[in-house]
Amino acid sequence: MFTGGTGFTQPNGIGTNWLLSRTTTYAANCQGACLPGAVVVPGLTAASVNIPLIAPGTEFTPRTNQLDFGLSKTFRFNTASFTPKLDLFNALNSDDYTSVANTQWAAATYLQPSVVLQGRLIRAGIDIKW
């Protein structure tokens, strides 16, 4: 199956990973079978390893619901027609996000929204035909 350049090789959702290095330590408040402040993988030979915590394609951004609408009315004068228009985009002013800055667990920007829908926009215009 050819998927080059189609984007079909990427899953639809994101997944959380934990980037471990030789010096990564457990948090001071860890609970369970860990020692607070101890190195997570003491015998790690690689510089770093990426551990998948949540499978790709199982974490999703909020569902995007956006309401756009427009009004127009055509007026005719002899051979000319005028159509004033008023459009309102994102009428409910949804603040959903479509992307996150980072999926690395324990990073400062973990799951912080990076792309948010634009706020309410109004567009006014007129079409003139003669």
Image (cartoon, grey):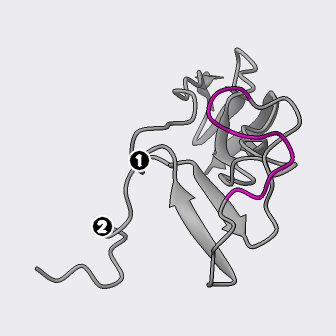
Residue at the image point whose x is 65% and y is 63% from the top = 41
Q: Is residue 107 left or right of residue 127?
A: right
- Callout 2 amino acid: Phe
First in residue order: circle 2 vs circle 1:
2
Image quadrant of residue 87?
A: top right
- In this rendering, is residue 91 above or below 61? above
Image quadrant of residue 33?
A: top right
What range is drawn magenta here?
A: 31-40
Residue at the image point whose x is 57% and y is 66% from the top = 50
Predominant SS of the magenta segment: loop
Say which mark, if any, is on residue 67: none
Q: Is residue 87 left or right of residue 13?
A: right
Picture coordinates of residue 82 (x, y %)?
A: 67, 35
Pick the residue in front: 42 or 75: 42
Residue at the image point whose x is 32% and y is 70% from the top = 9
View extreme (top): residue: 92
To which residue does mark 2 refer? 8
Disc 2 to disc 1, C-alpha distance: 17 Å
- In this rendering, is residue 62 above or below 50? above
- Label 2: how many Cα within 10 Å (few below 14, some 14–19, many 20+): few
Picture coordinates of residue 32 (x, y %)?
A: 64, 27
To which residue does mark 1 refer? 55
Check if residue 57 falls in the magenta segment.
no
- In this rendering, is residue 63 above or below 107? above
